[in-house]
Amino acid sequence: MSARPLRVVGRPVPRVDGLEKVTGRARYVTDLVLPGMAHAKVLRSPYAHARVRRVDVARAGARPGVFAALSSADLTWCEPYFGPAFRDRPVLAIDVARHEGEPVAAVAAVDEATAEEALELIAVDYEPLPWAITLEEALGPGAPLVHTGEPLSGHFADLATLRPQPGTNVCHRFHFERGDAVTALAGADLVVEDTYRFPPVQHYALEPHAVLAAWDETGALTLWASTQNPYSVRVELAKMFGVPLARIRVIVPHLGGGFGSKTYAKLEPLAAALARAAGRPVRLAASVPEAFQTVRRCAARVTTRVGFRRDGTLVAVECAADYDVGAYADIGPRVVQKATYTATGPYRVPHVRLDARAVYTNTTPGGAFRGFGVPQLAWALESLFDVAAGRLDRDPVDLRRQNFLAHGEEFAPGDTPIDGKLEESLGRAAEAIGWTRAGAADRGRGVAAMLKASLAPSVSEAIVRLHTDGSVSVLASAVEMGQGTRTVLAQIAAEVLSLPLARVTVVQPDTAVTPYDQTTSSSRSTAMTGRAVQLAAEDVRDQLLRVVAEALGVAARDLALEDGAVVAPARRLTYTEVLVLRFGMSGGELIGRGVIAPGRTAAPLGGSTPFWEMAVGAAEVSVDEETGAVRIERYVSVADVGRAINPLLLEGQDEGGVVQGLGHTLLEEMLYQDGHLLNGTLLVYRVPRADDAPPELECHFVENADGSGPFGAKGAGEGSLIPVSPAVANALARLTGVRLRDLPLTPERVWRALRARGR
Amino acid sequence: MQINVAVNDRAHVLEVAPHALLLDVLRDVLDLKGAKRSCDTQVCGACTVLVDGLAVSACTYLAVEADGRSVLTVEGLADGESLDPLQRAFLDAGAVQCGFCTSGMLLTARALLRENPAPTREDVLHYLRGSLCRCTGYRKIVEAVLAAAETAR
């Protein structure tokens, strides 16, 4: 068949779940009600680190209206530990509570108020222990150990290579070397070096984690969970509760945001345990303060050295990064390893030496958060790039352009060659921000670039069903959390099967119904799940063509799909007519299957990234010298996406990414004092508001159809966030001469730096 | 306590506890799940509904305060199948992502347009300070509110 112009893919169609969302009909976990459902509340440790000598839940359990009151002593019937990297996280604290807010006991009762009152009847005997809150405290000599024993390996085979260092708080070390960075740096004409800090920040998905769990009369478990990866949750629960995968059903309604906070099991094990003990369905809905105690972004301290030749050629990068992964590893070790692997950014660097450590501290566990460890490293590298440009008397845009990896160039032996054109992104960003035009005297401009790998290897499967009326069901387990995956998957199926979008329905993820998908994260759904949907739809298309070819005695290559019909040289058969031909009656359906499973490769991390996510950001800022307040007046993001399946949704994703990046750049930081989180509520933790967003914000896309995803698409959605901090700091430095190394760039920090410059 | 309250133009006589919050009464008693609970502290705006046309945070508003008043929730915004201009504009502008803030945003914007049918961009930004969104970056929401104001005029 000859290529025909795209009809649905590439169009800015409104999202398919929009109507239910603007009318209030969209259902999220906490909107669901089951008959007899109980409500859960969790008693959490008030200490950063404490021995839990005794937990007595007897009085709580005896209170009228309480169905179950649990401490870890009541969980002897299941495997009480979970975690994707290490099984180091107990459902309820066992002997030790390792961070403030760690669940110690839990109650399920007839309503939330009764459950809350019952918590007050639980007696816990704590013995406070010395704590380690910061990286310095956790890595110093004689540091209190967050974990003393060797952690159990996690449930995921691809994480079997993690290396904890017994007797320290280091739960994983990653080392990567290429060439001879030490010698190259010694011989470099210019070496710039500094230490950059990135704060712990909170995802603040508006919907906090929520689970509704129910065991049925046959011993099967069903959960409605706010999770980005129902299949990972299913594996954890199956192993913990000794139940076959086939008897655990994880259903995912709409998610009220994710951003990484809802990857891997969080509250699901506790909800399932409570439901089992209560003998009835249990809803466990976290509050926002509890979300602050559940997961956050890994803070980091990154020391990077970059060596250049006099002519601006990058010769070497050395990077030592310590990430604070909090009290439990969650997916932190993979965050550290995967990000550090790309610490050299989108540049050609012959000599590389990278060292990273994942460090336990007595704080909220650190996990996945949009960017997956890369923002922390890009903050250092992209800041240093501008420092180097200043020292070399070079334009920061030119210096980057000179060192960019080219399309098709190798990033690392065995990994996917670079599949985008960074110079095009940079050129467009520079043009849009007016880089070469003289700007106002009170404005500064800065740029930054990024490169990020996606999860590899990973698996996505999809099923497409064509029904007798010519409508289509797409079964896939990519989770709709706002990013628009349901719309994009529908567009892909509609395109392949030549149907209007309204004829395609994407089924909500349900492990009993929709096929395996590894995770909705790493910007992978459009590229991986979308490709599986494309293959499944093509499978259906091929079946349609085969039926007609056989019936009419023509060659399949002489047939085409057009507006819901198979078109032969002299005939036109609607899909309904084709299905009648196939089944001899009005019944039956065509089922197509698509599988994406690239498998392991010789790439350094064991799998070749399915695509490289690449983007450039350009900021124009002003600063109030009296207060130190920085304002992003204009921001341009350019992402190399291969093809924008839905430009409207993609633009929304990237605009949101920029403003989320603005959060950790200017406003956000989880602050600890005396072992306590000071600002774990929205009253005192400031996320960007409407009037914080840049007055002018443009998101552009480079589309060369050079991605491995459907119709040449690559993943997107994280790229716009990552350059924000360095682009803003670079702009501030060009405006004021002040270079800041600690995020966020609060008015106080900026004001102090401005004052120091003045003296 | 007994209250008389009109919700989305339907009269209700409800027995509520003195401490019952309007958000819980709407969600659990009347099964109107469109208003969402997020911050629980009057910061995020996800629970915003209109009481006699004014935007309130239902998470911190006692149900008894609504006695004798008229409440509008997102479920009452559309006139049958015909969407409110704000709903239409939010769809067209791509101002909806995860949807968790959407009902609060819509009702806050509705209160704004009632007060000021021709808001400037600055007016919109000011009015939306009490409504958080973590997905969109706000630009499309602001565009949608301005577009709806334009349509309504």
Image (cartoon, grey):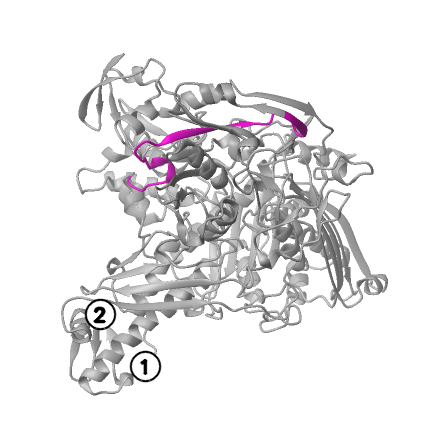
Determine the secondary structure under disc 1: loop
Mark 2: few/some/many CA within 10 Å (<14, 14-19, 20+): some
- Does the image show residue A451? no
Q: Is residue A30 magenta?
A: yes
Which amino acid type corresponds to the residue marked 2 in the rendered image?
A: Asp
Which mark is on residue A575?
none
Q: Is residue A432 magenta?
A: no
A357 or A12, nearer to the observer: A357
Query: Is residue A578 visible to the viewer in this orientation of the structure?
Result: yes
- Indicate the quadrant where residue A575 lies: bottom left
* Numbered label attached to residue A563: 2
Kindly identify which residue carries mark 1: A1
* Residue A163 x %, y %: 71, 53
Looking at the rendering, the stretch of residues picked out in magenta corresponds to A25-53
Which circle's residue, 1 or 2, is located before the other in the chain?
A: 1
Residue A63 is drawn in which quadrant? top left
In space, the residues marked 1 and 2 are separated at their CA atoms by 16 Å
Residue type indicated by callout 1? Met
Chain identity of mark 1: A
Q: Which image quarter is the N terminus of chain A in?
A: bottom left
Q: Is residue A422 placed above or below A717 in the rendered structure?
A: below
In what quadrant of the picture does the C terminus of chain A appear? top right
Foreground of the two, A515 or A603? A515
Chain of the residue displaying label 2? A
Where A397 sits versus A284, above or below?
A: below
Is A626 left or right of A428, judged from the image as shown?
A: right
